Amino acid sequence: MNKAHASWLVLTWRLPSGSSTPRVTLWRSLRRLGTAVLTPGAAILPFRDDLQEQLDWLAQEVEDQDGDAWVLPVTELTEVEERKVREQMNADRHAEYKELRADALDFLGRAPAHPGPDAAYALRLRAEKELVALQRRFRKVRDRDHFGAPGRGEAAHAIDRCLAFRHGISARLTPVTDVRVVG
């Protein structure tokens, strides 16, 4: 099969029964990539060379655990199948964006309790770390958002409101969370 024509990548696997650690590790890795799980032993991603490399590494890890794994390029899905996969991926990312937005709004709700510029360094550092973590989480979700899930702009805007509140706290904070959001 010619990779240039593949639209999707499917990882199929079988792990030996026993310890759940390899299954949990694989599941977490697949979640970080933003896969849609098709069955308990198969997951799908849109085709990209970097994603294929990641799935190849995961397949090798499964084989290192005495399991079987295959990374299969898929040229096309039926319209219904593709819609279901996209909807599942978008729903997963939308839930993550909603959680980020809620966490940012929680930060703003605690605004009066946050230390000011004259507060102790340790207190200011804790607020800075919370904001850096929000931005990092946003970038990770955005990186696995393969189809532009709803909620991205709202999450970025809420985080940016936190940053505006904390303006000047640190050079490590990026002033705009998602420069790719349009509108």
Image (cartoon, grey):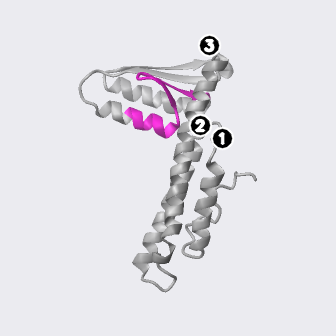
**Residue at far top of view:** 1
User: Residue 148, image x and y in percent?
Assistant: 66, 41
Locate the N terminus and report the quarter of the image it occupies.
top right
Q: Who is closer to the viewer here, 6 or 93?
A: 93
Range drawn in magenta? 26-47
User: Taking the image as drawn, is residue 74 in sight?
Assistant: yes
Q: Decide: is 143 above or below 130.
A: above
Instruction: Name the side, left or right, on which 26 lies relative to 43.
Output: left
Amino acid on which disc 2 is placed: Asn
Q: Going from the N terminus, do you reach mark 2 or mark 3 first?
A: 3
Q: Which mark is residue 134?
A: none
Residue at numbered disc 3: 1
- 157 over 66 or under it: above or below: below
Residue 124 pos. (x, y %): 46, 76
Q: CA distance from mark 2 to mark 3?
A: 28 Å
Closer to the chain start, of discs 3 and 1, is 3
